[in-house]
Image (cartoon, rainbow, N blue to C red):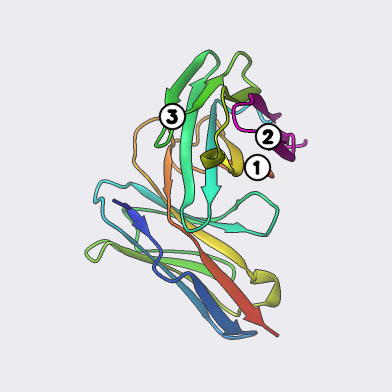
């Protein structure tokens, strides 16, 4: 049971390039989330999904797109990277039936540097 | 406007003593509060939570206290251990079916041996 995994661990992009971050979970969780963490800003929600085929915007969605074609995967795309998107990106998932405790389980993160 | 605030960026405590991490919030509709712990180069891990209808929850060395009238919660770690050195995030749930969380900015705890 690997939990939540993220690919890649680290990436350097040039301004204007595109890339996709992959999140996978093997815990059969319904809900998945993408966050970014910046110094002094805590974790901010980019997009989230409450089930296969559904996505919704979070607090800071601009410049990102997501897709949830399979229950276990949640992809975060940057169509045209900007230096402001330099950050550490975390994926999380939340188990079914945990609508009371609200617990989310996080992946190890992807460090992205946009030059 | 930050709905969840951790006003202390860092805290240093001696091993064996109590660590108290604080968190303030502004939205009285939050229904659940959670604490996460984060080591460098790792993802946050869930530590302890408390429902808005409770005022205390205890799990081993960790206790969370909730003061709804003051919109304040705190995490107590007793006794503190060097392995507790990490960044601690406070998070709050808006309620509803999405399990969305709003995070504070974190407090870096250093436990000195």
Residue A111 position (above or below residue B83): above
In terms of sequence position, does the residue under pointer 1 or pointer 3 come before the other? 3
Residue topped by disc 3 = A62
> Where residue A13 is drawn, which disc sits there?
2
Examine the rendered structure and indicate whether residue A103 appears above or below residue B37: above
Q: Are marks 1 and 3 in contact (CB under 8 Å)?
A: no
Q: Are marks 2 and 3 on the same chain?
A: yes
In 3D space, how far apart are the residues under numbered discs 1 and 3 (Cα atoms)? 18 Å
Q: Looking at the image, which is closer to me, A101 or A77?
A: A77
Going 51% across and 73% down the picture, which residue do you hit?
B10
Where is the C terminus of chain B found, in terms of image quarters?
Answer: bottom right
Q: Which residues are magenta?
A: A1-26
Lateral position of residue A114 relative to residue B5, left or right: right
Residue A113 image label: 1
Q: Secondary structure at mark 2?
A: strand
Q: Chain of mark 2?
A: A
């Amino acid at each position: 049971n690997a939990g939540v995994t993220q690919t890649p661990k680290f990436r350097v992009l040039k301004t204007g390039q595109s890339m996709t971050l992959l999140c996978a979970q093997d815990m059969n969780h319904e809900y998945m989330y993408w966050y970014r963490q910046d110094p002094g800003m805590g974790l901010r929600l980019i997009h989230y999904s409450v089930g296969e085929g559904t996505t919704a915007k979070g607090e800071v969605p601009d410049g990102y797109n997501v897709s949830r074609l399979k229950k276990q995967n949640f992809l975060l795309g940057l169509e045209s990277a900007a230096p402001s998107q330099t950050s550490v990106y975390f994926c999380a998932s939340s188990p079914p039936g945990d609508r009371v405790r609200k617990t989310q389980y996080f992946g190890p993160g992807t460090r992205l540097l946009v030059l | 406007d930050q709905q969840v605030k951790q006003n202390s960026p860092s805290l240093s405590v001696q091993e064996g003593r109590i660590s108290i991490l604080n968190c303030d919030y502004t939205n009285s509709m939050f229904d659940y509060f959670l604490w996460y712990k984060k080591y460098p180069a790792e993802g946050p891990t869930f530590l302890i939570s408390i429902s808005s209808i409770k005022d205390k929850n205890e799990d081993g060395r960790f206790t969370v206290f909730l003061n709804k009238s003051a919109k304040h919660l705190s995490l107590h770690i007793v006794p503190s251990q060097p392995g507790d050195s990490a960044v601690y995030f406070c998070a709050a749930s808006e309620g509803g079916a999405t399990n969305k969380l709003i995070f504070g900015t974190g407090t870096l705890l250093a436990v000195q041996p």
